Image: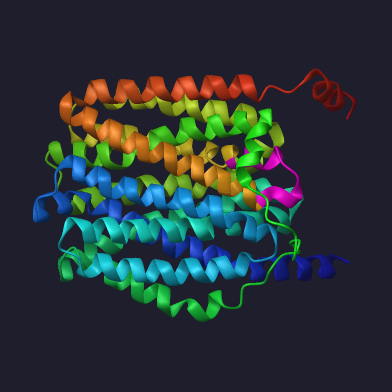
Amino acid sequence: MRSMTKLVISTQTRNLIPYYLTTFVMASALASVFALVAEFKNELGFSSFEIGVIISCGYAASFVSSIVLAPLADRGQAPLLLRFGVLLGAAALLILGVGTELWQFILGRALLGFALGAAGPAVRRTIILSDPDNFGRNLGRIGTADIAGFVVGPAIAIVFNLIGDFHTPFLAIAVVLICILPTIWRAQADQGRRGARYENPILLLKERKVLGALCMVAAYWVFIGAFEPVWVMELDARGAEQWQIGLALTLICFPIAFLAPIGGTMAQKYGSRLWSMGLIIGCSLIAISFGFVPGLIPLIAITFVDACFEGMGFTATPMMVSEAVSEERQASAQGLLVSVSVAIAAVATLAFTWLYGATDDTTTWLAISVTMLVFGGLGWILSKPSHLELNKEDNN
């Protein structure tokens, strides 16, 4: 019996390898873009606002693809979306690898965002349904693959930027995506409802618990959308070299990757709603401190503390969304999560890069923190269980 259980677990893990691999490599590609933001500014002369536009266009494209394409995964087409995402991602990186004009970087980042939005919900649906009793741990593992990509991405950017120029990392990762295509082609579909009619994910917003969970998602992604450009530009303003920025991005990813499966298990045990709120409060308080900490090394040290909070908590928000819908709507819900995430991140990127350029770092991080707490408080209220649900939990 024990050997049979091990065989089932081994088969499940093997079937999920294409999904983990796609998440890892695509995250590496995205991380390399963020690691080279300072190079866009220094080598090509892009302004802070233009850099914000490049990043925001990627988020906007992810918004569209995750809304439109995610329901296809609920109909058994997750492997198809995975293959499409990898092929489009490789094409996007090739454009970034030869681009010299602003429009080329906007196009490349947009195509990369569209690829991520197509593949992401398909990956999450498969991960959630592969083992429902441990979906918190499994979401943590996919989070680890994601963060591992963010660890490797800046390292690739550093090495290949030294070997060639800032175009070279994009070309290298494009080659890797092409090389993993045979593995991606072997991805197995779950038991989605093949032939079922298309259902618009937007209709899920009628559900109060879904809306509350998405407010929690929005609170966290205000931080992510603002952090990526503002934090990197702040390091640059404090005198960091490109290799130091890449190394810092790599180091802060380690606690997130290590703690994600543990955090997912704890969130499933103690409640994703409570865990999500803890994440938001912790990150918002640390965000305030970013504006008051002097010097380069102290800023990186505080960011490392924030990474520990994120590692323990970031899987809780997709868990909230998953728990708010039925099995048949998991990909649609996760697609809606991606859309809200990237929409909020796009707005946050534009708004807070502008605010950073117009004011200072202290004002910017304070505004980020307040915005996070507003969304988090709204999500806490909307996601509050009804009396009937509380009575059912007590009986259980």
Q: Residue at coordinates 32% horizontally, 57% vertically from top-left? A: 109
- Which stretch did the figure color magenta? 318-330
Q: Is residue 259 visible?
A: no
Q: Residue at coordinates 14% horizontally, 49% vertically from top-left? A: 46
The N terminus: image quadrant:
bottom right
Front residue of this view, candidates 283 and 341: 341
Q: Position of residue 294 (x, y in %)?
A: 19, 26
Q: Position of residue 52 (x, y in %)?
A: 26, 43
- Say if 283 sits above or below 171 in the image: above
**Residue 97: quadrant of the picture:** bottom left
**Residue 81: quadrant of the picture:** bottom right
Question: In the image, 203: left or right of 54?
Answer: right
Question: In the image, 192: left or right of 127?
Answer: right
Residue 261 in magenta stretch: no
Q: Name the colouring of the figure.
A: rainbow
Front residue of this view, candidates 202 and 54: 202
Q: Position of residue 204 (x, y in %)?
A: 66, 39
Q: Is residue 30 visible?
A: yes
Q: Residue at coordinates 68% horizontally, 57% vertically from top-left? A: 74
Tell me the chief SS of the magenta region: helix
Question: In the image, 93: left or right of 245?
Answer: right
**Residue 110: quadrant of the picture:** bottom left
Question: In the image, 24: left or right of 55?
Answer: right
Residue 321 in magenta stretch: yes
- Say if 92 sits above or below 39 in the image: below
Q: Residue at coordinates 15% horizontally, 70% vertically from top-left? A: 164
The C terminus: image quadrant:
top right
Q: Position of residue 301 (x, y in %)?
A: 30, 35
- Say if 386 sits above or below 226 in the image: above
Front residue of this view, candidates 149 and 351: 351
